[in-house]
Image (cartoon, helix red, strand yellow):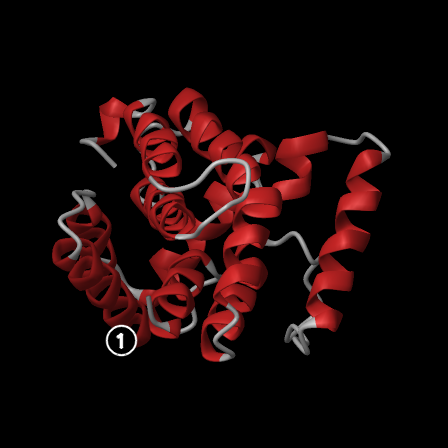
């Protein structure tokens, strides 16, 4: 796992700023998935990006993520809705960022998915594998699973859906490589393969 993988995922799911960097990010993630023998239909997302102008990408991004709360890119929203527990979740994320010397750019909330993905890239650069995998298990995968379910239910044909599925798949595989006291080795790998199988309609990512 390299930091480029998580930073590329972040670029794919952030507000589009430049086509060239977005296409580079897609190619980087596709190369990683192919190298790991993981199938995910990112080619459809890449074709959409290549065929669109930057203005069209930005318009579609806003229509998908800003005007559709069902697939808003905020994991706390999917985990807790407007429950008070969401506030505690945000405080926890902010505390983890500070503890590991990560300062997000911009003014997004700490549960914004690209912010979280940039943090994972930061942890890779720092060699903090155990901290990264624990963070993924506790704070990332549960919300990403719910976001994937929301895309399947309400935005099945969205060009960004494969990008979100790639996050789920890569985070799941990264987590599976770690050793967890309560669930390690083949048990973790099988758990994440079962998560992958829960979304067979995205062949098979």
Where residue 177 sits: x, y (%)? 36, 51
Quick one: 127 or 146, which is closer to the camera? 127
As helix, strand or loop, the secondary structure at mark 1 comes to helix
Within 10 Å of disc 1 (Cα), the crowding (few <14, some 14-19, many 20+) is few
From the viewer's perspective, tell me whether residue 187 is left or right of residue 77: left
From the viewer's perspective, tell me whether residue 155 is left or right of residue 35: right
The residue that appears at 25% across and 58% down in the rendered structure is 49
If the image is split into quadrants, where does the N terminus sit? bottom left
From the viewer's perspective, tell me whether residue 84 is left or right of residue 22: right
Q: Kindly tell me whether residue 34 is visible in this rendering.
A: yes
Where residue 57 sits: x, y (%)? 36, 57
Where is 76 relative to 193, above or below?
below
Where is 189 relative to 177, above or below?
above
Q: Kindly tell me whether residue 74 is visible in this rendering.
A: no
Name the residue at the right extreme: 84
If the image is split into quadrants, where does the C terminus sit? top left
Provide the residue designation for mark 1.
20
Where residue 146 sits: x, y (%)? 52, 30
Q: How many marks?
A: 1
Quick one: 60 or 13, which is closer to the camera? 13
The residue that appears at 17% across and 54% down in the rendered structure is 36
Name the residue at the front extreme: 181
The residue that appears at 68% across and 41% down in the rendered structure is 76
From the viewer's perspective, tell me whether residue 92 is left or right of residue 55: right
Where residue 35 sits: x, y (%)? 13, 59
The residue that appears at 62% across and 46% down in the rendered structure is 139
């Amino acid at each position: 796992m390299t930091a480029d993988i998580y930073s590329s995922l972040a670029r794919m799911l952030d507000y589009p700023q430049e086509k060239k960097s977005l296409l580079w990010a897609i190619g980087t993630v596709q190369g990683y998935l192919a190298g790991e023998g993981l199938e995910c239909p990112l080619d459809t997302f890449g074709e959409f990006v290549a065929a669109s102008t930057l203005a069209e990408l930005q318009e579609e991004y806003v229509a998908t993520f800003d005007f559709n709360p069902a697939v808003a890119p905020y994991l706390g929203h999917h985990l807790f809705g407007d429950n008070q527990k969401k506030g505690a979740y945000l405080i926890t994320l902010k505390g983890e960022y500070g503890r590991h010397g990560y300062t997000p750019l911009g003014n997004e909330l700490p549960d914004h998915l690209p912010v979280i993905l940039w943090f994972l890239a930061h942890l890779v650069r720092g060699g903090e594998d155990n901290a990264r995998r624990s963070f993924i298990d506790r704070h990332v995968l549960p919300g990403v699973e719910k976001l994937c379910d929301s895309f399947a239910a309400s935005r099945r044909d969205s060009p960004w859906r494969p990008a979100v599925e790639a996050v789920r798949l890569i985070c799941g595989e990264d987590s599976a490589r770690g050793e967890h006291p309560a669930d390690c080795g083949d048990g973790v790998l099988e758990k994440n393969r079962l998560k992958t199988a829960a979304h067979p309609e995205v062949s098979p990512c």
